[in-house]
Amino acid sequence: MEELMIELNNITKFYRKRNKVIKVINKVDLKFKDDEILCLVGESGSGKTTLGKIIAGLIEPTEGEIKYNGKLLKQMGSKEAKEIRRAIQMIHQDPFASLNPVRSVYQTLSTPLLYYNIVKGEKETKKKVLELLEVVDLTPAEDFIYKYPHQLSGGQRQRVAIARALTVNPKFIVADEPVSMVDASIKASIINTLKRIRKEFKVGFLFITHDLALARLFGGDGKLGVMYTGRIVEYGFTDDIIGNPKHPYTITLLSAVPEPDPAVTRAKKRVKLRSDDIPRLDSLPDGCHFHPRCPLFIEGKCDKLLPELRAIHSRHYVACFVEDAERKILEMTREND
Ligand SMILES: Nc1ncnc2c1ncn2[C@@H]1O[C@H](COP(=O)(O)OP(=O)(O)O)[C@@H](O)[C@H]1O
Ligand SMILES: [Mg+2]
């Protein structure tokens, strides 16, 4: 496979619980290539993990299609489908749940290497496992190779999970909040490892986080999708969105990001919403899902029609009926002073 193009058309994921329908993902369209960095941000419960798993082929959408190089998984032969599964790897959020407790680091990393015939024989396998441990900065690698998960810290486990994703030479990695459950002191060092891997292995990333500052740190040079209740409400190049946010929800998120300079953070005005309640996924409001909270909500429009993503220019899309949202919100916060 030369390159990998992933295309989501009208992806929807519903779960049925008793007689309720939980709408986790609502008609998402996305298209990206394996040389891209795409960050997905949104509050907890907005559907980030579900969308990541759909992209990695780990769960099936209820409606819509996902194509890899123009083909559905079910249209592929078993060899081709196995190749796609190899090409997209996932790093899960919880380093304590993602490693098998009865397998050593060597066993965890050697299994996929042997399954995909990437190495042969014990000597070559061990050499490759040691190499991978070096890549993820678990050094000296000899000290880690025969350890079990319970002998490792959360950060070290997450590094093993990263190494496992790399065993099969993926084209694209879905990293689901990879540092949200590790100690604050080592978050930056794991992000640096991932950034180096991005460049060294030329691997694309879907980087999922609830933290816009982290999205900027990891994928400031890539694209950003802002999720709200299972929809992508703003999409485009990260620097365009952060420098010039268009959706009232994105503007709200940005107003809450702390600045490096504490004085700037204090001076920055938090956007005041009409309500702090995130709507329930089993009773989403009509129209724009954000309208019950939105300070700019237009009666008769935002509560009636669901806005689709529209292009502001070729690098920036927003799903909102309001023009000039940032200026309007800024004026409102001034008035409230
Ligand atoms: N298997 C499932 N059955 C029912 N609801 C689910 C299931 N998986 C996820 N959900 C619900 O979907 C919503 C979005 O979940 P998730 O994709 O994990 O969001 P995020 O990663 O943004 O926090 C949550 O409200 C969650 O409870
Ligand atoms: Mg999640």
Image (cartoon, rainbow, N blue to C red):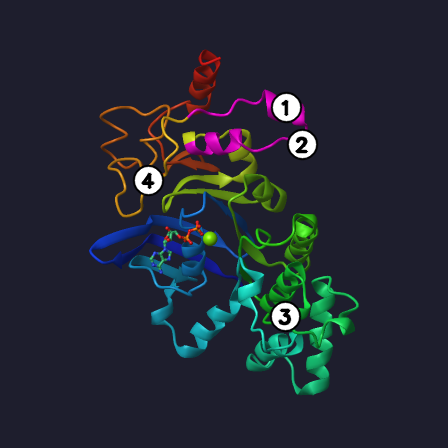
| Front residue of this view, candidates 58 and 168 | 58
Marks 1,2: beta carbons within 8 A = yes
| Range covered by the magenta-colored residues | 249-272
Q: Quote the CA–CA distance across marks 4 and 3.
A: 38 Å
Q: Which residue is mark 3?
A: 149
**x, y percent for residue 125:** 68, 81
Between discs 1 and 3, the one toward the N terminus: 3
- Magenta-colored stretch includes residue 258: yes
- Magenta-colored stretch includes residue 185: no
| Front residue of this view, candidates 232 and 104 | 104
Give the image quarter of residue 264. Answer: top right
Indicate which disc residue 260 carries: 2
Of the two numbered discs 3 and 2 in the rendering, the one whose residue sits closer to the viewer: 3
Q: Which residue is mark 1?
A: 264
Q: Is residue 7 above or below residue 107?
A: above
Give the image quarter of residue 98. Answer: bottom right
